[in-house]
Amino acid sequence: MTRLVAVLGYSKRGSEELHPICSGRLARALQEAGPHDAVLLSGWGEAGAMARSWADRPAHVVLDARARSTFGNAVAVARAARSLGIRDVVVVTSGWHGRRAGALVRAALRGTDTTVSVAAADDRGSLRARLRELFCWLVVPLQAGLAARLIKPLD
C-alpha cells in the first residue's frame, strides 16, 4: 500500500442514511484513491454506510466507527497510518473543514516522517457550519497536544 486515503464522515445525529456532505466526501475519495492505496472510512454512524457505498472498489478498506468528532477522526487516521506502516496520508473532507482536520492529523502524527495532505470535496458549507468551524478552532491547541500524547512515537 502506498497511501492512506482517510475519509472523514459527516452525519446528522441519529440518521442511518449517508448525509449529502458525507456523500460528497466519499465521491472525492473515489477520485483520489488508487488500487494500491488503503482507505480509512472514519465516523461513528457513517463508517458502515460509507463502506456499503464503497463496495467493489479496488482498495484495502479499513473501518473506524468509533470517531464522534474531528479529533476522534484524527486519532483514528494516525493509528491506521501507524499500524499499516504508511507514510503518506490524504485526508478527504469538506473544504471548510480541511484546515482544522489536517492540523489535527498532523499533530497526531507529530514525530513521524508521515506527510499529510488534504483533498477537499466541493462543499463550501453552510454559514452555520463555517461559524461552527471557526468556534472549533478555539480548542485545536488543546486537542493537538492531546493527540500527540495519545499517539506515541514508535521506538
Image (tube, rainbow, N blue to C red):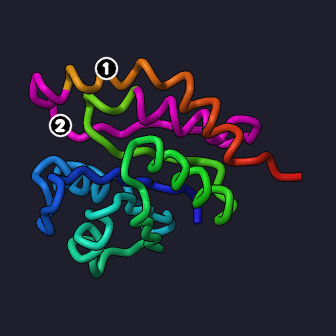
Distance from the alpha carbon under mark 1 to that under mark 2: 22 Å
At a point 35% along the width and 46% down the height, the residue shown is 92
Q: Residue 57's spot in the image, x, y percent?
A: 31, 75
- Judging by the rendered image, the residue that carries numbered circle 2 is 122
Of the pair 44 and 116, the residue shown nearer to us: 44
Front position in the image: 150 or 92: 150
Which amino acid, mark 1?
Phe
Horizontal side of 144 relative to 91 (left or right) equals: right
Q: Secondary structure at mark 1?
A: helix
Residue 135's spot in the image, x, y percent? 31, 20
Lower position in the chain sequence, tag 1 or tag 2: 2
**Residue in view at x 18 percent, y 55 percent:** 13
Q: Is residue 20 left or right of residue 1?
A: left
Q: What kind of residue is marked 2?
A: Asp
Q: Is residue 124 magenta?
A: yes
Relative depth, front residue between 21 and 60: 21
Q: Is residue 65 above or below residue 11?
A: below
Residue 17 quadrant: bottom left
Q: Residues within 10 Å of mark 1 (few under 14, many from 20)?
A: few
Q: Residue at x 31, y 32 (%)?
A: 97
Percent coordinates x, y for residue 69 in the rendering: 38, 46
Q: Which mark is residue 135?
A: 1
Q: Which mark is residue 126?
A: none
Quarter of the N terminus within the rendering? bottom right
What segment is highlighted magenta in the picture?
100-129
